Image (spheres, grey):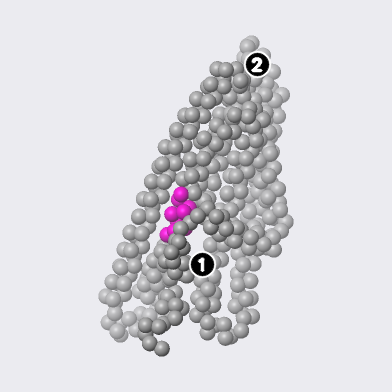
């Protein structure tokens, strides 16, 4: 076989990904909503199956606690309206405080219950992550030990096995952490939306005016990261391999015997410079998307506050309910921030 007819497995070094070949095909490099959601679903199903196998009780407890936290948050927001009503009414401060005291104590109880549920959720997560990693490693090693010896002569299998060993388990652990953060943030946002819908039908759309720009910024950043993932991984692995050649005992003697230190340094410099330039370009593109999202979210916040003012002026919304809407807005924005950080990490 001539040198021009090498197979793709022999042409592609360890640090290159098959996704690069997919991206090179016409239409293969785009990230449509359908494609991204499909990839997320493909990743979520095995993650959920591993989670159920590794720690079914902890997983069920975590899901239940998160749902209860959302219910408690919605109830606390609604009860805030009842607390604010007597506090904003007429009369002396003592009379207003006495009228609000029963609901105020109930609100304190709900907040305490929410803290207890968050603590239970944290304990469940402490069980989940190590057990998930333990089961994933065992399944990987079991598959490696049970496969036919001939499989190790297949470059594709050998490449995938080492990718899973070197990075797969670690990324699986990080994916679980990010998925849990996304779940918690989504439940908190949903609780705020339900509470606002109970107060007035126009309040949820006003809240979405603030949240949608942030969601768009996260989506845009995810598209950028996905489109550049193959290049990021390839450059990172190439740089790591050059770093290992420069520091490992096994290669030290041969490098010196071949008088190749300068070659290793130059190869490292090329890959490290390319990785640096790539990450800077990616970071600047993401910063532009985030800045645009912040400006749009600021405009949405201004419109939301203006809408609250119009509802108050028209008498369609009591002052206490408007105060609750502001609290829900702050709560939803904080939850959206958690989702944003988790999405970037994921």
Specify whether residue 225 is painted magenta. yes
Callout 2 crowding tier (Cα within 10 Å): few <14, some 14–19, many ≥20 = some
Residue nearest the viewer, comparing 336 with 255: 336
Residue sitting farthest toward the front: 26
Residue nearest the viewer, comparing 26 with 172: 26
Dot placed on the residue nearer the N-terminal end, 2 or 1: 2
Is residue 122 positioned above or below 104 on the image? below
Residue nearest the viewer, comparing 340 with 120: 340
Q: Position of residue 117 (x, y in %)?
A: 68, 43
- The residue pinned by badge 1 equals 167
Q: Position of residue 42 (x, y in %)?
A: 59, 61
- The residue pinned by badge 2 equals 96
What residue is at 45 percent from the left and 61 percent from the top?
Answer: 27
**Type of secondary structure dominating the magenta stretch:** helix
What residue is at 44 percent from the left and 74 percent from the top?
Answer: 14
What residue is at 66 percent from the left and 46 percent from the top?
Answer: 66
Q: Say whether residue 229 is visible.
A: no
User: Secondary structure under badge 2?
Assistant: helix
Q: Quadrant of the N terminus?
A: bottom left
Magenta segment, which residues? Answer: 220-229
Q: How many marks?
A: 2
Q: Say whether residue 304 is visible.
A: yes
In the picture, measured across the screen, residue 296 lies left or right of residue 331, that is left
Residue sitting farthest toward the top: 91
């Amino acid at each position: 076989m001539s040198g021009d007819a090498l197979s793709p497995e022999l042409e592609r070094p360890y640090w290159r990904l098959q996704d690069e070949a997919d991206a090179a095909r016409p239409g293969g490099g785009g990230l449509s909503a359908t494609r991204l959601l499909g990839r997320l679903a493909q990743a979520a199903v095995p993650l959920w199956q591993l989670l159920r196998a590794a720690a079914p009780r902890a997983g069920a407890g975590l899901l239940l606690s998160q749902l209860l936290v959302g219910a408690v948050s919605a109830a606390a927001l609604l009860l805030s309206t009842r607390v604010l009503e007597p506090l904003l009414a007429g009369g002396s401060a003592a009379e207003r405080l006495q009228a609000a005291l029963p609901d105020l104590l109930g609100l304190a109880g709900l907040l305490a219950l929410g803290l207890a549920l968050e603590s239970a959720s944290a304990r469940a997560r402490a069980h989940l992550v190590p057990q998930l990693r333990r089961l994933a490693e065992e399944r990987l090693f079991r598959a490696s030990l049970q496969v036919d010896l001939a499989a190790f002569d297949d470059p594709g299998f050998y490449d995938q096995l080492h990718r899973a060993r070197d990075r797969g388990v670690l990324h699986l652990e990080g994916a679980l952490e990010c998925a849990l953060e996304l779940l918690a943030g989504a439940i908190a946002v949903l609780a705020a939306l339900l509470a606002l819908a109970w107060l007035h039908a126009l309040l949820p759309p006003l809240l979405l005016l603030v949240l949608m720009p942030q969601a768009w910024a996260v989506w845009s950043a995810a598209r950028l990261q996905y489109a550049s993932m193959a290049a990021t991984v390839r450059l990172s692995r190439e740089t790591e391999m050059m770093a290992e050649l420069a520091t490992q005992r096994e290669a030290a003697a041969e490098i010196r015997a071949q008088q190749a230190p300068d070659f290793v340094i130059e190869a490292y410099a090329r890959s490290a410079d390319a990785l640096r330039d790539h990450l800077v370009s990616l970071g600047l593109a993401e910063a532009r998307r985030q800045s645009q999202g912040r400006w749009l979210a600021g405009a949405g916040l201004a419109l939301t506050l203006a809408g609250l003012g119009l509802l108050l002026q028209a008498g369609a919304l009591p002052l206490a309910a408007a105060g609750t809407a502001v609290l829900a807005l702050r709560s939803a924005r904080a939850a959206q921030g958690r989702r944003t950080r988790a999405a970037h990490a994921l």
